[in-house]
């Protein structure tokens, strides 16, 4: 991570992570707290590894990592995904042949370890356990919303209808200015937001819909590829940790053997008097 970005991150999270010194001890600096949180989330080691690396107690490491994640969610989550200029997005989709669209929605399944007592809810058709990830992106493939909480047994329509983005659009607060438009363009204020298309419009929209939806598929594929690469890196790190652990065990065994040999050796003869 570049130093400039890490310093900026420290400045943003300081109000939530900074602690005061007490009579018993000095507080851990915010810079160290951020470094511990980034290292733990990036490499996913055990708390014991982070504790040994940063010289803090295991319980302290756990508390700092949780506080770091909560601070990131509170201060930075709203920065990560948002709807851009709605009119520019709709113009881009109109040029693709699908007008009055502000986002493309698609979903995939993420493998998980199911919670106890609820395994049947998360079983996929392939026999594995997963949750549904629903993503919405704009015309450039940038994600503007994500929903990750529904089990495999939930229908896609149910996930979409109960998502935050759906509620925001129904409430008229998702698109700035709440333009009341339908598939044929701006509508009167009393008209419904979504209006049925005519029979003449449906063939044209059906022809352009696959091309417009490809953007969402590409964005989801890139996200899955990034996760797969991260998972492969985690597996490599885990394998490297196992090799290091085995080497340490062998070195410890060799050291114990050498000490046992030294104990069995006869004592050296006394030196002659001068």
Image: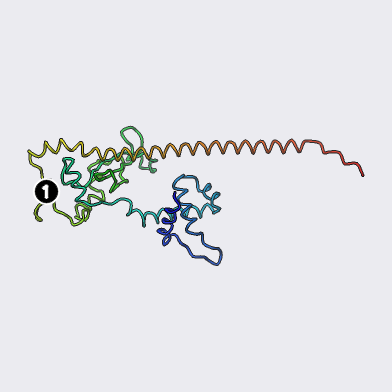
Give the residue furthest to the right.
274
- Residue that label 1 marks: 185
Give the residue furthest to the top.
126
The foreground one among 112 and 35 is: 35
Give the residue furthest to the bottom.
23
Q: What residue is drawn where x is 19% and y is 52%?
A: 170
**Depicted 229 relative to depicted 48: above or below:** above
Q: Position of residue 121 (x, y in %)?
A: 32, 40
Image-quadrant location for residue 73: bottom left
Q: Position of residue 69 (x, y in %)?
A: 41, 53
Quadrant assignment for the C terminus = top right
Q: Position of residue 86 (x, y in %)?
A: 21, 51
Q: What residue is drawn where x is 10% and y is 42%?
A: 197
Q: What residue is drawn where x is 53% and y is 39%?
A: 241
Count of marks, rendered view = 1
Mark 1 surroundings: few (<14), some (14-19) or many (≥20) residues within 10 A: few
Q: What residue is drawn where x is 20% and y is 49%?
A: 88
**Depicted 55 relative to depicted 245: above or below:** below
The foreground one among 164 and 206 is: 206
Image-quadrant location for residue 124: top left
Q: Is residue 146 left or right of residue 66?
A: left
Q: Position of residue 267 (x, y in %)?
A: 82, 38
**Depicted 42 relative to depicted 221: above or below:** below
Dot 1 lies on which element?
strand
Image-quadrant location for residue 247: top right
Q: How is the image coloured?
A: rainbow
Q: Is residue 132 left or right of residue 91?
A: right
Q: Is residue 189 left or right of residue 67?
A: left
């Amino acid at each position: 991570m570049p130093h400039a970005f890490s310093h900026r991150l420290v400045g943003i999270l300081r109000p939530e992570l900074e602690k005061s010194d007490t009579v018993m001890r000095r507080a851990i600096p915010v810079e160290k707290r951020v470094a511990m949180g980034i290292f733990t989330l990036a490499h996913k080691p055990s708390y014991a590894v982070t504790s040994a690396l940063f010289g803090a107690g295991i319980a302290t490491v756990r508390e700092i990592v949780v506080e770091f994640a909560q601070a990131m969610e509170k201060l930075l989550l709203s920065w990560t995904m948002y709807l851009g200029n709605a009119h520019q997005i709709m113009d881009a989709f109109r040029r693709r042949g699908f007008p009055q669209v502000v986002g493309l929605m698609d979903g995939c399944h993420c493998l998980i370890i199911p919670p106890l007592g609820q395994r049947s809810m998360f079983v996929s058709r392939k026999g594995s356990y997963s949750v549904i990830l629903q993503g919405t992106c704009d015309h450039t493939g940038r994600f503007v919303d994500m929903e990750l909480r529904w089990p495999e047994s939930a229908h896609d329509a149910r996930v979409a209808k109960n998502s935050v983005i759906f509620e925001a659009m129904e409430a008229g607060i998702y698109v700035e200015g709440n333009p009341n438009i339908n598939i044929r363009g701006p509508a009167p204020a009393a008209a419904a937001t979504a209006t049925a298309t005519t029979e003449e419009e449906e063939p044209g929209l059906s022809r352009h819909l696959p091309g417009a939806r490809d953007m969402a598929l590409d964005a989801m594929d890139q996200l899955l590829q990034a996760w797969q690469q991260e998972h492969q890196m985690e597996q490599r790190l885990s394998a490297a940790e196992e090799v290091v652990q085995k080497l340490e065990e062998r070195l410890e065994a060799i050291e114990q053997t050498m000490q046992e040999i030294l104990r069995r050796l006869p004592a050296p003869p006394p030196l002659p008097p001068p």
